[in-house]
Amino acid sequence: MKTIEFEGQLRSNLGKSSSRELRKEGRIPCVVYGNGENLHFTTTALEIRDLIYTDELRKASIKLGDKTVEAIVKDVQFHPVTDKILHMDFQAIVAGQTLKTEVPIRLVGSSKGQKVGGTLVQKMRKLKVLIQPESLCAYIPADVSPLDLGKSMRVRDIQVTEGIEIMTNSSIPVASVDIPRALRSAQSKGAAEEEA
């Protein structure tokens, strides 16, 4: 799992007007919680872009003055029009304390259905999990090798390592192999010819 290191400036002025001023200066108000105290700080979009614009879960190593905090991104608020980052929440990683977060799903393998012309469709991108700090991972692999044409893989079919408990509903589909229209029409023509 990749760790992104960046520096934050602790702040004492809290509230809407203070946050607005910080955003005008190009800084992003942030908070890290979960280690017994809430630490409010600011950073720049350039420093944290590798934490947000990725398809993996990444750790953050935040240097705040003489203190360094290990954390994961908990929430990001974007401006509805400009898509600029307005605020970020981080959850501190504390040994022995379970984290509740979302981990990306990565489909691995080549399904049986794809080999005969089917299209693999990923229907879910992230899983809600309870995870121990030592079990943190960049993504959860989902093996799609056994999927045949017209079949789907559900959350319950995903195997996870020890220290990870999936909280997402087990019956939700994660991926499926769709039958292309051309293949479907060829199958129906073949069936019609057999009947005749």
Image: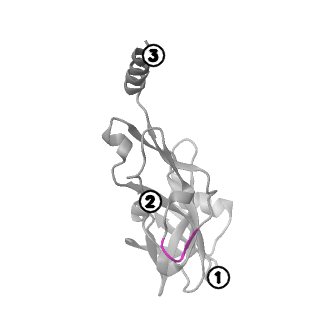
Foreground label between 1 and 3? 3
Q: Is residue 190 magenta?
A: no
Q: Quadrant of the N terminus?
A: bottom left
Residue 49, quarter of picture: bottom left
Quickly name the residue at label 3. Answer: 195
- Cα gap from disc 1 to disc 3, whole angstroms: 73 Å
Residue under the point 61% across and 59% down: 168
Residue lying farthest top?
196
| Residue 85 placement (x, y as % from top left) | 52, 55
Quickly name the residue at label 1. Answer: 37
Residue under the point 51% across and 79% down: 133
Q: Quadrant of the C terminus?
A: top left
Dot label at residue 45: 2
Foreground label between 3 and 2? 3
- Cα gap from disc 1 to disc 2, whole angstroms: 24 Å
Per the picture, the main secondary structure of the magenta-coloured stretch is loop
Q: Residues within 10 Å of mark 3 (few under 14, many from 20)?
A: few
| Residue 54 placement (x, y as % from top left) | 41, 57
Q: Nearer the viewer, residue 130 or 38?
A: 130
Which element is circle 3 on? helix
